[in-house]
Image (spheres, rainbow, N blue to C red):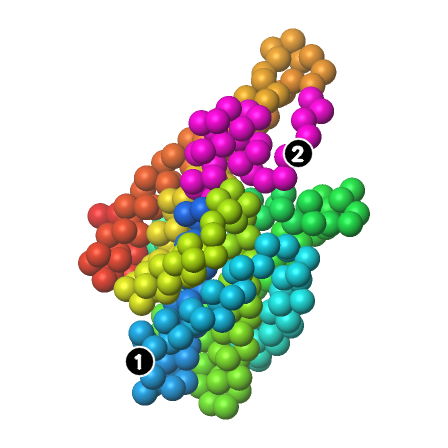
Amino acid sequence: NGYKNIEGYGDVGRVVLGERGETLVNVCLVISQVGFATAYIIFIAANVISIFPGIGRATICYGCVPALSALVQIQDMAILSPFSLLADVANLSGTAAVFFQDFSAFHHHEIIKTYDFSSWLYVTAVAVYSLEGVGMVLPLETSCIKRDDFPKLLKWSIAGITALIATFGVCGYAAFGSHTQAPVTLNLDGGVASFVKLALCVALYLTYPVMFFPVWLVAPFSAPMRVAAVVGTASVAFAVPSFGKFLGLVGASICTLLGFIIPAVFHIKVFHYDAKGGEGGLKKWELMFDYFLVAFGVVFGILGTYDSFMSLVNHTDGKGVD
């Protein structure tokens, strides 16, 4: 309808549902992005400890704070692009080395299960966490020089990332079977393993400020408050050492709300259903699909959040709801 100045997910919420919609979306975005950033520090701590067992967890978590506190002061995504590029290089190097280690480690005689429905809640929650990035879409588009090319780039990126995640998971499980740890880098050993772990730690460390960029768009905190946010994520990372369980909790709760429920509700609200099949309205199958996304999001969100929370509290493996 010709709306302008829509630069973020919260702006869409304001246009569709008013101030309440904007507040809901922004609160969810802040929680999800802070959750992502916290998971990065958990990953870094777990891998650094595996390389240097003598270093305390608190030293690693809070040792990340000074440089990250400086990086999160940057308010222009374009300035962060060199850090993101360096992170991508480190990430690709580490990922390639993990694949190599996976094939080298495939020497066990354990029978590989093709499926295990007892863990479907946990697996789905982690998958949602891995793929949910709706809060970054509009900020990335507004930063593009050629915005018309962004939709095509986004589709190819999602397809490539999905294929990479699936291949990565299959190779890791095929290599280590039931002994696969979260993150899988903890299964690696030797000199190459140390390089892989450090490369991925550098990648996530440099990606950390990018995860906070949507937060600053909706809540432009002062410099001291940004430092406090970094300290807060480090504190949560220190208190919750389980990388996989934390991913499951964030994915099942806030990511499900942002990725399934809210977009479907917005779609129904904006386009409406026209029983006469008028131009511009939702077709019946589109309406049914939106309702399915909402129903799936609600049911999975409740069950998955409960399962993930109980696995954290009880220190179990998240095998499903009893």
| Residue 48 position in % (x across, y down) | 41, 79
Residue name at image x 32 percent, y 63 percent: 235
- Dot 1 corresponds to which residue? 56
Would you say 151 lies left or right of 286 here? right
Relative to 273, does residue 138 appear above or below in the rendering? below
Is residue 20 highlighted in magenta? Answer: yes
Query: Can residue 97 be seen in this snapshot?
Result: yes
Relative to 17, does residue 78 appear above or below in the rendering? below
CA neighbours of label 2 inside 10 A, class few (<14), some (14 to 19), many (20+): few
Instruction: Assign a secondary structure to mark 1.
Output: loop
Q: Nearer the viewer, mark 1 or mark 2?
A: 2
| Residue 200 position in % (x across, y down) | 52, 73
Q: Which residues are magenta?
A: 1-29
CA neighbours of label 1 inside 10 A, class few (<14), some (14 to 19), many (20+): few
Q: Amino acid at mark 1?
A: Gly
Residue name at image x 51 percent, y 54 percent: 212
Would you say 270 lies left or right of 314 here? right
Q: Amino acid at mark 2?
A: Asn
Instruction: Assign a secondary structure to mark 2.
Output: loop
Residue name at image x 49 percent, y 71 percent: 67
Q: Closer to the camera, 239 or 298?
A: 239
| Residue 77 position in % (x across, y down) | 64, 55
Residue situated furthest top in the rendering:
276
Q: Closer to the camera, 263 or 231?
A: 231
Is residue 39 highlighted in magenta? Answer: no
Name which quarter of the figure residue 164 lies in: bottom right
- Dot 2 corresponds to which residue? 5
Relative to 306, does residue 311 appear above or below in the rendering? below
